[in-house]
Image (cartoon, rainbow, N blue to C red):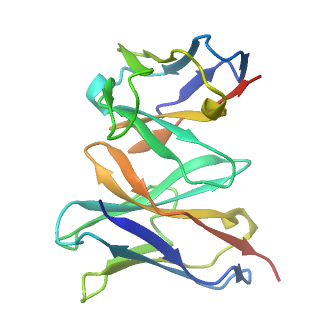
Amino acid sequence: ELVLTQSPGTLSSSPGESAILSCRASQRVPSRYLAWYQQKPGKAPRLLIRGGYTRATGIPDRFRGSGSGTDFTLTIDRLVPEDSAVYFCQQFGGSPLYGFGPGTRVEIK
Amino acid sequence: QALLQESGPGLVRPSETLSLTCSVSGGSITSDYWSWLRQAPERGLEWIGYLHFTGNTTYTSSLKNRVTISLDKSKTHFSLTLTSVTASDTAIYYCARHRGASFDPWGQGIPITVSS
């Protein structure tokens, strides 16, 4: 089974700062099969990054995906209050075929 | 881009069958892959299965004996059927379109409770 682990569990930061979110896989994941989502309370997840580093339509360049192998990172620059959300990483190709990490909660105060 | 909307009952009794529909507007199901996913607090996000517009399907192994995803003949919506539900099937259910190896967009989600 391919397990995704995300850290930290919760990240508290201030407007204008940067946040670095980690996603670690128990097996190698091709970067083209790694995605990131943002979920706000009561809403569906929204695709931020696909293919490891390609921003989805309408996603500002403050959101950057990077990494390879088993270690991937989502960096959010110049944090704004609206970035408060839970962020999930997702892989394709392992077992299960599509799997998600448990999420990192980002709080902007 | 396509808009997706889930519909179905909010409450299902244990051992019964859950049936959900995903209506697609602003796009066509005659291309791409389409999935059902669910999210429960104790289990997180879970992919259930996908449907290709040709009618081919693939399901996650833990649910494959109970789940069916099908395409309506009108090709304006697709459905999820989950048999013999238990309390552990209580979750928010989402439908989504595939974007490569990711999901975009998602429907707004429909909360489903399994309880007598």
Where residue B52 appears, as percent x and y from the top left, is: 23, 65
The residue under the point 42% across, 16% down is A70
The residue under the point 36% across, 20% down is A28
Q: Residue furthest right?
A: B116
Q: From where the camera sits, is residue A102 visible?
A: no
Where residue B7 appears, as percent x and y from the top left, is: 53, 80
Q: Residue furthest top?
A: A17
Q: From where the camera sits, is residue A61 visible?
A: yes
Q: Nearer the viewer, residue A55 or A80?
A: A80
Q: Disc count in the image? A: 0
Where residue B107 appears, as percent x and y from the top left, is: 48, 63
| On screen, residue B31 above or below A83 | below
Q: For residue B11, which quarter of the picture? A: bottom right
Left or right, A104 with respect to B33, comes to right
Left or right, A2 with respect to A93, comes to right
Q: For residue A63, which quarter of the picture? A: top left
| On screen, residue B104 above or below A106 | below
Q: Nearer the viewer, residue A99 or A46?
A: A46
Q: Nearer the viewer, residue B11 or B61?
A: B11
The residue under the point 71% across, 24% down is A108
| On screen, residue B81 above or below A33 | below
Left or right, A44 with respect to A94, comes to right
| On screen, residue B25 above or below B50 | below
The residue under the point 71% across, 15% down is A14
Which quarter of the image is occupied by the C terminus of chain A? top right
Where residue B24 appears, as percent x and y from the top left, is: 35, 73
Q: Nearer the viewer, residue A80 or A46?
A: A80
